[in-house]
Amino acid sequence: MRAVTVTPGTPDSLRLVEDFPEPPTDEGSVLVEALAVGICGTDHEIIAGHYGEPTPGSDTLVLGHESLGRVIEDPTGSLNRGDLVAGIVRYPDPVPCPNCAVGEWDMCRNGLYTEHGIKGLPGFARDRWRIPPKFAVRLDPSLERVGMLLEPTSVVAKAWAHVERIGNRAEWKPQTALVTGAGPIGLLAALLATQRGLTVHVLDRATGGPKPQLVGALGATYHTGNVADLDFEPDVTLECTGAPVVVLDVLHKAAPTGIVCLTGVSSGGRMIDLDAGALNRELVLENNVVFGSVNANRLHWDMAAEALAAANSEWLEALITRRLPAASYAEAYTPAGDDIKVVLDFAR
C-alpha cells in the first residue's frame, strides 16, 4: 500500500512509501479506499518541518487531511459499500475538556486533541484508511470529483455558523459581505455567503488568472487594491489572508454592529503601527465583534456537505488547478504561483 509520509520536524523528509502497512482495525471499523486528498498550506508547513506530530510509537506521519474516499466495508451498517465519504480531521481529547465532551472538539480548551495528517493521527494520503463511523461524512455522489473540498468548506461553514449566532444577539439583517483573500478558503467562504443571499465582495492581490472569473461566476464582485479604498462598509467580513495589514484594515472597515471573523493564520514577526485607542473606540461605539475561527465539528461538516451538494459542480471543479497522480507526489506538494487547490489523485 502506498502512503505519503514525513518525519515531523525534519525539513524535506517527504516521501512516497510503497509498502506501507494496511490500516489496523483499531483506527476504525470503516475501511475506505482513497480517491484523492487535497493539499493546503498546512501540508507545506509540516513538510518544511515547522510543526506536526508523528503517530505514537513512530517517528513518521502520514500526510493528508483533506480526504475523499469510497467505502469498502462498514460492519456496523452505518455506511454502505460504495458510499462516497470524507474523514473528519480532528478527534476529541481523551480527558476530555468540557467542549470535547459535548462534541465541540473544534473548541478544545486543553489542546490534547489529535488530527489526521497533522497531530498524532495518520493522514489520508494512503491507498486505504480506516475511520470510526461517527467521523465519516457521507457525500452526495455528484461530488465524486470535488469531495476533497469538504474539509476547507467545513472551516468556513463553522465561521458562518458562528457569525450568525453572534449576529442574532440583536435584530440583524446583514446585506453585504466582504471576503479578503481568494484562495480556497476565501472562495468557499464567498460561495457560502452567496448561498445566504448576501451581496458579496472578494478582495485579493491577483489581477489575472482564474480568481476574478471564479468570483464573477458566483455573482460576486472582485476587487484588488486596499481594503481602505473600498466604497462600502461590510456587515460581515471573513478575513482569510492572515496578512497583518489586511487584518487591521478590515477591523477599521466594519459597518456598525459589523462582525469580523478571522480565519487566516498570521506568521508573526512583522510589526505595524497601530492606534489601539482609536481602534478600541470604533469597535466599542459601533458594537462590533471580532473573533477567530479554526477547525470544525460534526455539525459544521454536515453543513459543508449540504453546501457543496447545492453548489455548481463545474464551479467547484474549477477551484482545482492541478490534479496529479500519487506517483507525482513530489510535484504535487511543490507550490506553484497560480495554484488555487492542488489534488493528489490516488485513483490514478
Image (cartoon, rainbow, N blue to C red):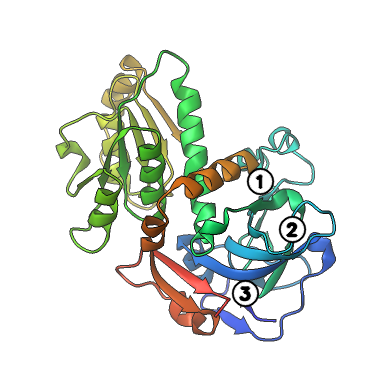
- The residue carrying pointer 3 sits among few (fewer than 14), some (14 to 19) or many (20 or more) residues within 10 Å by Cα, namely many
- Where 160 sits versus 164, above or below? below
**Residue topped by disc 3:** 7
Residue at x 41%, y 36% (from the top left corner): 261
Q: Nearer the viewer, mark 3 or mark 2?
A: 2
**Residue closer to the observer: 71 or 99:** 71
Residue at x 50%, y 31% (from the top left corner): 162
Residue 55 appears in which quarter of the rendering?
Answer: bottom right
**Residue topped by disc 2:** 80
Q: Secondary structure at mark 3?
A: loop
Q: Position of residue 79 (x, y in %)?
A: 74, 55
Q: Position of residue 175 (x, y in %)?
A: 30, 26
The three-letter code of the residue at mark 2 reads: Asn
Q: Position of residue 36 (x, y in %)?
A: 56, 69
Q: Is residue 249 left or right of residue 195?
A: left
The three-letter code of the residue at mark 1 reads: Gly
- Where 184 sits versus 50, above or below? above
The three-letter code of the residue at mark 3 reads: Thr
Q: Nearer the viewer, mark 2 or mark 1?
A: 2
- The residue carrying pointer 2 sits among few (fewer than 14), some (14 to 19) or many (20 or more) residues within 10 Å by Cα, namely some
- Determine the CA span between mark 3 and mark 2: 35 Å
Sequence-wise, the earlier of marks 3 and 1 is 3
Note whether residue 49 is visible: no
Q: Secondary structure at mark 2?
A: loop
Note whether residue 9 is visible: yes
Q: Position of residue 66 (x, y in %)?
A: 55, 60
Q: Is residue 19 left or right of residue 207?
A: right
Sequence-wise, the earlier of marks 2 and 1 is 2
